[in-house]
Image (spheres, rainbow, N blue to C red):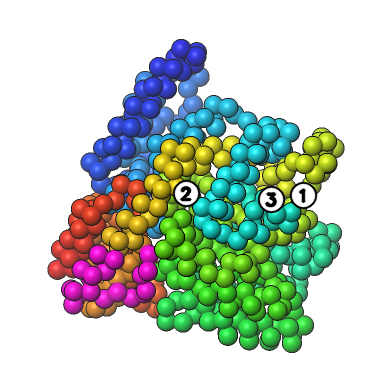
Amino acid sequence: MTPEQFRSNGHALIDWIANYIEGVERYPVNSRAQPGDIRASLPEHPPMAAEPFADVLADLDRVVMPGITHWQHPRFFAYFPANNGYASILGELAAAGLGVQGMSWVTSPACTELETLMMDWMQEALALPDRFRSTDARGGGVIQGSASEATLVSILAARWRATNGAVNTTGDTSKLVAYATAQAHSSIEKGLRLAGIGTAHLRIVAHDNSFAMVPADFASLVDADRLAGLVPFWVCGTVGTTSSMAFDPIGAIGDTARQNSIWLHVDAAMSGIAALAPEYRWVNEGLELADSYCTNPHKWMGVNFDCDLFYTADRAALLGALSILPEYLRSAAAESGAAIDYRDWQIPLGRRFRALKLWFTIRDGGIGEAIEMIRAHVSLTQDLATWVAADDRFEIVAPHPLNLLCLRLVAGDAATDALIAAANDTGVALFTRTVLDGKVACRVSVGGRATGQLDVRAAWQLLQDVAG
Ligand SMILES: *Cc1c(COP(=O)(O)O)cnc(C)c1O
């Protein structure tokens, strides 16, 4: 592709993207493809000869689109959102255009310094504790690909601290024990497996009828493990669980964690972003006790996947666990302590210039645009809750202070399963099934950038219609 072809193909692609986003409502929300359909519509072998870009673009429509579930659709109420935004898409494009690999400060100083500034901007915008700022010698933040990676690096830092670094050489994790509720994200068990702790050393702490951790149960499990000669080392408190958006009492968990030198990680992947709006800053309760924290602009802020903000108040432990310094990566800037090498804050060595899409998004809409979106989603969810409560065929099964509503049919599990299947089958809207303390529920996650009142009304109409 020549530069001239790049210009014209690029313009064509930008038009294609804008047309797609503008017209996304014309598609059924979920893909109708059967396994194997997409591959079967493409040649089995790569072409030896060049093909025109126009053909590739045409195949995007012909082959790829039928295999797309439309996450940007305003009636996508499934999972949690993965919003993009025009400014973010352009930031992504700029990152690809620059093509830098920002593993170290010296490999592109702007890549590191813009990221550090974005982490500090977001610390301020979210009103997070100052100990997470990069200007605090002991703390700081970094963009991870996902909350799952944030969980893993948090476990690794905690593991390093609990063993005074010995784990790096001995690999001995046999005494370490971790804690979370059954409502916590699956990445916690995965992270513990990866870190050599193992599922058998994950204690499942009781939750109450709002699906939040019972701190007294956490304290007694810790006592029992200590008595048994084990080393409680890591606890995850969740701010907005995936299944029902429950809020663990972080302050109370943090008190026990402090008393027992346990690393407190707070997973606020979805709901942490709510703190952009001052009236929702209660989601930050107890964070001054957290050793690490994460939240995802790629869910609720219009920054396209992947962009997870990971903060720690103990960067020494993180670096202790993750820094590796072969000769070819040495630099005077890093050795003087004047520069950050983010490769030591994450699992991979290489890293993309992800700060650009956050920077573009914040500058394009200000923090104010995200706040407006958050407020609108919360308000729409509360409207929906009022409508659901007025229909005696339905019941609401979990508290819903923000933008997730979990409902079910009073008629029971089989009826609720049939409701979800029938609703999703229409392609008009998309919901996710969950099970809360043994009961099937339909999650309605109101988080699409383009989702408005008509969409929430349509979703409710659909649920009422298929409820029969
Ligand atoms: C979505 C979610 C995750 C996983 O986020 P990724 O960034 O996709 O890994 C983890 N924890 C909670 C509470 C979530 O809602």
Q: Looking at the picture, tell me which residue is in the foreground, 265 or 438.
A: 265
Task: Tell me the mark number nearer the camera, choosing from 3 and 2.
Answer: 3
Callout 1: SS? loop
Tell me the SS state at disc 2.
Answer: helix
Q: Is residue 436 left or right of residue 459?
A: right
Residue 243 appears in which quarter of the rendering?
Answer: bottom left
Q: Is residue 393 magenta?
A: yes
Tell me residue 99's x, y (percent).
59, 29
Q: Earlier in the sequence, mark 2 or mark 1?
A: 2
Q: Is residue 382 left or right of residue 148?
A: left
Image height of 384 relative to 46, above or below: below
Gap in angstroms between the C-alphas marked 3 and 2 = 25 Å
In the drawing, what numbered circle is on residue 135? 3
- For the record, the magenta segment spans 382-402
Quick check: is 10 in the magenta stretch? no
Query: Looking at the picture, which amino acid does disc 3 mark?
Result: Thr
**CB of mark 1 near ligand 1 (< 8 Å):** no
| Label 2 Cα crowd, 10 Å radius (few <14 / some 14-19 / many 20+) | many
Q: Residue at x 55, y 53 (%)?
A: 124
Residue identifier under label 2: 298
Q: Is residue 127 visible in the rendered structure shown here?
A: yes
For the question of whether residue 198 can be seen, the reply is no
**CB atoms of marks 3 and 1 within 8 Å:** no
Label 3: few (<14), some (14–19) or many (≥20) C-alpha neighbours in 10 Å? few
Q: Could you tell me residue 345's position as x and y percent?
A: 69, 50
Task: Answer whether labels 3 and 2 touch (C-beta < 8 Å).
Answer: no
Q: Residue at x 46, y 18 (%)?
A: 6
Location of the C terminus by quadrant is: bottom left
